[in-house]
Amino acid sequence: MTYDCIIVGGGPAGLSAALMLGRCRRRVLLCDGGEQRNLAARRMHGYPTRDGTPPAEFLRLARAELSRYPTIECRELKIVDASKDGSGFVVLADDGTRLKGRKLLLATGIVDDLPDLEGLQELYGASVHHCPYCDAWEWRDRPLAVYGGPEHGPGLALSLTPWSADVLLCTGGSRIVPDAAARLSAAGIKVRETPILRLEGRHGMLERIVFAGGDTVARSALFVCTGQRQRSSLAERLGCRFTLKGAVDTGKCEATNVSGLYVAGDASKEAQFVVVAGAEGAEAGMAVNRALLEEDLAHSARVSGLTATG
């Protein structure tokens, strides 16, 4: 069987694209490896009607909606390779399954590089976060900390000031350049350049940061900015262009420079929100359907012409 579109990634972008294409009566295969970026979070935010919903519950609801459409097939498959096959694509799963699709949509997301801090894993997703827009509201007017180096740490610390007047930037031993230090000072942000020894807390809630030397600072939440990377190498293997920030360079409706290949969600954009990923998935689904429709109509015209002259 050749699917109209194979979607790799079962997060908000992939689910939204599958829904759009299913409603267009396209034969869709959604391959989900179960590695969504936000599964560690207790709640997702910023999505109308679903603000505060646990990520796993959001995925369950979305998959249940897809089950109403007979042309959508969802499979638990981790896709490890993909290649062009004429005008379409062939993908390979880690169990050896080979699948063909006329179009390919990658919604594979990104991976956050977490700092190697003792105690962080127990707090991650509950009181250790990445995105102020997603999680800072829950910590408004509480003492907050940022962990990050000179390149991104000051910017993240400054971005937290609408939510709290008590923000501490921890650089892990790196020095902040004078211009950045002046901006931080003017905003009332304190800076600690001493390395962190460990994070302490209970039941997922941060209570204090312990620095090398033994002194401690009480904090309620920590926001980290220590880098991220593409979760999948499929876009690179297929020849996609990338931005200077490492995101897949997409154009109108999430199309890439590779014909028939689309990328939606966190892998391709700077605004990494669930609601944005869902919107990009819908856009990509619409673009895929339009491309399929043009091909179908062109094929019908050729067949009709052959019949008329035959």
Image: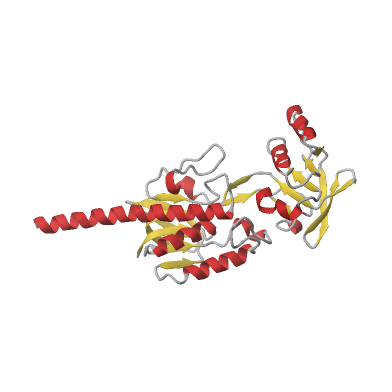
Quick one: quadrant of the N terminus? bottom left
> Is any part of residue 85 visible from this angle?
yes
- Residue 270 horizontal/vertical position (percent): 57, 44
Query: Whole-percent x and y of residue 305?
Result: 15, 55
Task: Check the image and report above or below for 131 versus 97.
Answer: above
Between residues 142 and 237, which one lies in front from this camera angle? 142
Q: Quadrant of the C terminus?
A: bottom left
Q: How far across and how far down the image is residue 263, in percent? A: 47, 50
As displayed, is residue 60 above or below residue 269? below
Q: Which residue is drawn at 76% across and 53% down?
A: 139
Q: On the picture, is 216 further left or further right than 75?
A: right
Q: How many marks?
A: 0
In which quarter of the view is residue 89 placed?
Answer: bottom left
Measured as percent of width and height from the top left, residue 134 is found at 66, 52
The residue positioned farthest toward the top in the image shown: 178
Q: Is residue 29 above or below residue 159?
A: below
- Left or right: where 179 falls relative to 95: right
- Residue under the image location 26 percent in, 55 percent down: 297
**Residue drawn at point x = 79 percent, y = 44 percent:** 165
The answer to whether residue 28 shows anywhere in this view is: no
Given residues 59 and 50, the one toward you in this image is 50
